Structures are given as structure tokens and as C-alpha cells.
Image (cartoon, helix red, strand yellow):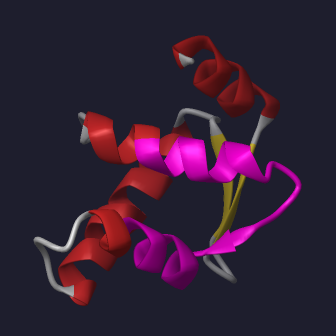
Amino acid sequence: MELPLALSDEILKILAQNYNKTYSLEDLTSIIMLTDNTCSEVECQAKVLDVLIQLDDDELIVLNPETDESSITKKGVIKQTMKI
């Protein structure tokens, strides 16, 4: 599955800014909706969740399936840092 590049980069950027913090799906969706209000909350949440699952599969983040909370991994921080 190919990630929506801008959305995956935005999520990694958010998580990297506070790498010791976990973000819920709702928190990330709210932050993303501030910059992209072209979709409804349900659509945006679905897109964010799809990206989170893929980032977790790529080991760039850790997604807790029980709480829907995400945090960035060292690999994710390195990838985000390389983009700057």
C-alpha cells in the first residue's frame, strides 16, 4: 500500500516534535484537520488511521491497537530528521 506522502510526513512531523508523548487517533485527526479541512472528520480519521497502520508496519511509529495511541520510534525520528 502506498502512503499519502504528505499525510505520512505530517504525522511523523507531529510525533517527532514531542517524541516522548503519545497521541490518540482523535488528537492526530484534530491536528491534521486544522491544516486540511477538505474532508469530514470521519473521512480524515479513516485516512489518518490508514497511514498510522502503514507507519506502524514500517516500524516508524508504535500504534497501540487497544488505545489507538501512537508514538514515534527512533527509526521514525531519524527518517523525519533526514527530511529537514
Left or right: residue 46 versus residue 40 is: right
Residue 17, compared with residue 78, is above or below; it is below
Residue 56: x %, y % from top left = 57, 46
Residue 27 image position (x, y, % from top left): 56, 79
Q: Which residues are magenta?
A: 10-32
Count every numbered label the image shows and give the total: 0
Location of residue 6 by image quarter: top left
Position of residue 62 in the picture relative to residue 3 (left or right): right
Please give the name of the residue rendered at 35% of the width and 72% of the height, measured from the top-left corner: 34
Residue at 76% of width from left, 39% of height from top? 73
Residue 32, by quadrant, is bottom left
Chief SS of the magenta region: helix
Image quadrant where residue 22 sits: bottom right
Please say whether residue 25 is one of the residues in the magenta stretch: yes
Front position in the image: 63 or 9: 9
Farthest residue, direction right: 20
The N terminus lies in which quarter of the figure?
top left
Q: Is residue 56 visible?
A: no
Q: Position of residue 30 (x, y in %)?
A: 44, 80
Q: Quadrant of the C terminus?
A: top right
